Image (cartoon, rainbow, N blue to C red):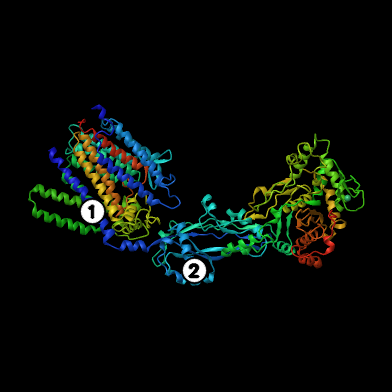
Amino acid sequence: MERLLANRKYIIIGFFILVGALFLVRLFYVQILVDKYILSANNNVLRYMTQYPARGLVFDRFGKLLVYNEAAYDLMVVPRQVKNPDTSALCQLIGITTVEFRKRLERAKQYSPYRPSIFEAQITRENYGYLEEKLFLFPGFFVQLRTLRKYSFPVAAHTLGYIGEANPEVIAKNPYYKSGDYIGISGIEKSYEEILRGKKGMKIRVFDVLNRDKGNFREGKYDTASVAGTDLHSSMDADLQIYGELLMTNKKGSIVAIEPSTGEILCIVSSPSYDPNLLVGNIRKKNYALLLSDTIYNPLFNRALMASYPPGSTFKLVDALIGQQEGVITPDTRYGCPGGFSIGNGKMVACHPHPSPLDLAGAIQISCNTYFCRVFKSIIDNKSYVNTRTAFENWRKNILSFGFGKKLGIDIPNELNGNIPTANFYDKYHGKNRWRSMTIISLGIGQGEIGITPIQLANLAAIISNKGWFYTPHIIRAIGKNDSLNQAFMTKRHVNVDPSYFDVVIEGMSLVVTAGTARGAKIDSIVVCGKTGTAQNPHGKNHSVFIAFAPRENPKIAISVVCENAGFGSTWAAPIASLMIEKYLKRKVTRKDVEERMINGNLINGKLPESESGKRDISQD
Amino acid sequence: MRAEKGIFHKIDWVLVGLYLALVITGWLNIYAAVYDESHRSIFDFSQKYGKQLFFILAALILALGILIIDPKFFSQFSYFIYGFFVLALVVVIFSGREISGSKGWFAIGGFGVQPAEFAKMATVLALAKFLSSLDVDIRKGKDLLTASAIIFIPALIVLLQHDTGSAIVFFALIIVLYRAGLSGYVFLALIALPVLGVLALVVPKIILAGALLTLTLLLLLFIKRRLKNILTLGAVFLVTVGFIFSVDYSVNHILEKHQRDRIHVLLGQDIDLKGTGYNVNQSLIAIGSGKFFGKGFLQGTQTKYNFVPEQSTDFIFCTIGEEQGFLGAGLMVALYTLLFIRLVLAAERQRSKFARFYGYGVASILFFHFTINIGMTLGLLPVIGIPLPFVSYGGSSLWAFTILLFIFIRQDSFRYQLV
Ligand SMILES: [Zn+2]
C-alpha cells in the first residue's frame, strides 16, 4: 500500500511539470507568437501632465491689478518616446538649429529618458497654433499650458520681484518643486511664494503612437486637481509708485513712503530700475544678464532696502529725542554756536552762519551742528552712567529701538541691517577705554560709522509722526479674501522715548519746512514736517537726504528720499519728497515748475548748475 | 561523528542554491521595477530594493537560526505553533491594520507583518504531525474530517480578513492529503471542480447542464450497468449540476465586488482595458514587449511608466518578462519547477513520515503561490494578489517562505537520524 502511494509522486511531479509547461507555452505565445502586445506597448503611453495652478494676482491699495498671468505654452519632450523625428521640420517650427535640437534632446535625456522636460519654453500663442497642427508628426513631443507672469505697469520691479525656473538646489531641498517649475526668486514673488503658487495637480492621460490623446487614465481616478494661488492685496499706491519713479528719472537713489498709522508701505522706489516685464518668460535669461552687467546703473540693486547711508542731519532728530529722554536737555536748552564745535587738537566740526543761541526747535530748524554735538556729548558723558562705555551701550540700545542697526523685518527679501557701531567696535578700533564722547562725536550729526537704509529712514519719519511707535513696515496688507496677515505686522513696536518728547521735535520739523533748511518742500494747505540731511560719500559728491511726514495732525504719509551725489538735502531730496506728499494726499500736483525741474534733473550723466555744486562742504542743511 | 554535525551537515545544497537564485533574482528585479535615476544605488535604503536587501539579510539569519534548532522541535511543537498562529489570525482581525483592503496586518516596529503568511507554515506543520501520527488513515472519514479541519480553520479565518488569495493557498494542502492516501477520485474531483466552476461562469448554465447530462448518458453506455454504478453516476451528475448553479450564485452574492470584476474580466465578459482589466492587459503588454531576449536590465519601458501597478510585489514577473524576455521568464518558470520537483524527491527520501508530509506541504504551498501568481500575470487566472515566493517585494512573505523551506531543509539534513 505504502509503495503504491509512493508512486503518486509521479502524478504530483507530473502535475507540477504540466503547469510549468503550460506557463512556458503561454509565455511563448505572448512573447514570441503574437505581435499585438508589442504594438500595444508602443501604442499606449501614459503621460503625466502637471496641472499648473494660476499664480495668485497682486493688487494695489486701490484695487488696481499690479501682477497677473497670461497663457503661454511649453513644448515638452519625453526623450524615450522620440522616434527619429524629422528634426529639420521641428527645428524650423520653433526656430532652432539641428545642432541645438540634438543638444536639447541630450539634456532632456540626462534629466530623464521617460519623464517630460521642457524643450522650448513659452511659445507664443501664435506659434503654438502652427505647432499644434503639426505636433502629431513628432511623437515624444507635446505642449503643456503654462502661465506667464505679467506686470501691469513698468514699475516697482524690485518690490514685486520675478519668478523663474526652480534651480537644482531648490529642487533637491524642497520636494514640491520639479524641474521646470516656477518659483518666486525675488521681491514679494519670493517672500509670498507659498501663498502665490497654489498647489500643483496631476492629470494622467493615455496617448497613442500618433501622439493622440486617448483620454483620461482610468477615468481620472489618479488625477489630482490643482489649487489656484491666493491673491495678494498690496498696500502699494500704484500711482504714487509710478510718479516716484518718474521723479527719480536719471537719478540714483530711493523713495520710501509709509502710512504711519498702519506701517503699510505706499511705495518703494529704487532708481535706476527696470521694467519688470523684462524678466518674464524666455527673455528673462538674456535680459537678466544684461541688467546684471550694467555696473554703472546697477538696476538690479534695490537701494531702498540694500543701500546703507550715513543719515547725516536727519539723525539730529534722534539726538533730540534721546537727549530729552535721558534728561540731558529740555526743549528750552540753549546753546550758542561759535561757527562750529571744537573737538580738541585745534579741530572742529564746522557749522554754517546762523542766529545764536538757539533752543531745541530752533536748532532742528536750522540744523545746527554745534548744538547736536553738545547734545550727543551730554548723552555719552552723562554722569548717571558709570563710564563712557555704559552710557554708549545705553544710547545704542535706545537707537536700536528705532529699528536701526537691524533688519526691520519687512515682507520683501534681502533687507539690509544697516549699522550702528558697538562699543566693542570702538574698543577694537581705538583700544579699550581709549575712546570718549569726543572720539565718536560725528555720530551725533549722523556721520561716521553709522549706516541706515532708506526704509529705516522712512520708518523714522513714521515713528516721529506717531510720537513713539511704529508697525513693522509691510507691502502686503491682506492675503486672499480674509485679512490673514502675519502677526508681526499687527504688533505695535514702541521706541524707548516717551511720547511727550516728540512735540518739540515735530515743531522743529515743521519749522524746517516753513522757515528752515527745506523751504522747497512747502506745500500750501498741507503742514509738512521734515528734516534735511547730507550723507557723506567718500567716493564722490555727497548724497541728498530728506525725511518728512504730513499732515502734521493725523499724519497720512511718512517718507524718506535719498538722492545720491546730489549734494544738500534741500536741493533735490526735499522737493521730491514734497511732490510725493502732494501727489499722495491731493492725488494731483499743482507745482508744475518744481515737478518739471525734478523730473528733468539728470544726476547721473548731466552736469549740475555751478551754484548748486559749490564748495561748501560743511552742511548748510 | 559529532564534530561533523555542524549546521551545514548533510544540507541539501540544491534546494539552498535554488532558494538563493530566486531570492537574488527577485532583488535585482525589484531594483529594475522601481528604478529611477534619482536613486541609482541598489543599496539605497529609502527605496524598495534597499529594504528588500535588508529583508533578505534578515531572512538568511532566520534560515541560519532554523538550521541551529533541533529538528525534533518542529514535530514536537507543531500543534503548539499551529495553535499560536490560529490565535494570531483571530487577534489580527480585531486589532490589525488594514493594508490595501486586507485587515491581516500587525504593525511591528514600523514593519507590517502578516500572520497569514506564517499560518501557512504552521498549518503544514500541524497537518504533517497529524498525518504522521500512528493509527491515522486519511481514508477514514473521521481522520479526513480532522485533516480538513486543520487546513480549513485557518483558511476560513484568513478569508474573514478579506485576504482571498492567502485563503485559497491553503487548498494546496490537498496535494499532501492525496499523497497520504486520499482517494484519487476525490483528488480529481477537487481539481475538476474549479474547471467546472470557470465553465459555469462562461457557458450558459442550461447548456452546461445539458452537456453534463449528455456526458452522463454517454458514460452510462460504457460502464457496467450495475445499480451501484448507475446510482453513483446519477449522484455525481446531480452534484455537478448543483455545483454549477451554486458557483454562479456565490460569484454574484458572496464574492466582493472587485473580486467579481476580476473574474468577469478574466473570462472576457467585461473588457474594460482601463478598468479592472487594466492590470492584466498592461501586464501582458509588458511581458509581450520583452520578446525573446528581453529589453535588457533596467531597460523596461512599460514598467518604468508605472503602467503595471504593484510592479515590485504581485506583478514582479512582468519586469522579468519585459526585461529578460522569454529566455529569462522561461528560466524562471524552470527554476521553480525544479524547486518543486526537488522538494518532492527530497520528501520521498525521508524516513520520518512527518518530514515527508511536511516536505510535500512546502512543495504544495510554494507551487500554489507560483501557479496563482504567474497564472494571474499571464492572464490565465483572476487577479488574486498573492506574492511570488522568494521573489516579490516584502519582508513578511519572504521571511515566512524562508522559514517554511528551511524547516524542511533542517528535517532533511537529519533524515538518517530521524525516524
Ligand atoms: Zn550752528
- In x, y percent, where is residue A322? 81, 44
What residue sits right under mark 2 in the picture? A97
Asked whether, in this view, residue A139 is left or right of residue A307, the answer is: left
Quadrant holding the C terminus of chain A: bottom right
Query: Observer-nearest residue: A336 or A410?
Result: A336
- In x, y percent, where is residue B13? 26, 39
Q: CA distance from mark 1 to mark 2?
A: 55 Å
Asked whether, in this view, residue B211 is left or right of residue B88, the answer is: left
Quadrant holding the N terminus of chain A: top left
Labels in figure, total: 2
Instruction: Assess disc 2: are there few (<14), some (14-19) or many (≥20) residues with their C-alpha within 10 Å of its C-alpha.
Output: some
- In x, y percent, where is residue A555? 78, 54
Q: Is residue A340 above or below residue A381?
A: below
Q: Is mark 2 within 8 Å of ligand 1?
A: no
Amino acid type shown at disc 1: Leu
Labels 1 and 2 share a subunit? yes
Amino acid type shown at disc 2: Thr
Query: Observer-nearest residue: B206 or A492?
Result: A492
Label 1, secondary structure: give it.
Answer: helix
Task: Evaluate whether residue B155 shows in this view.
Answer: yes
Label 2, secondary structure: give it.
Answer: loop
What residue sits right under mark 1 in the picture? A22
Query: Observer-nearest residue: A339 or B32?
Result: A339
Task: Evaluate whether residue A523 shows in this view.
Answer: no
| x 31%, y 40%: residue | B402
Chain containing mark 2 = A
- In x, y percent, where is residue A252? 73, 60
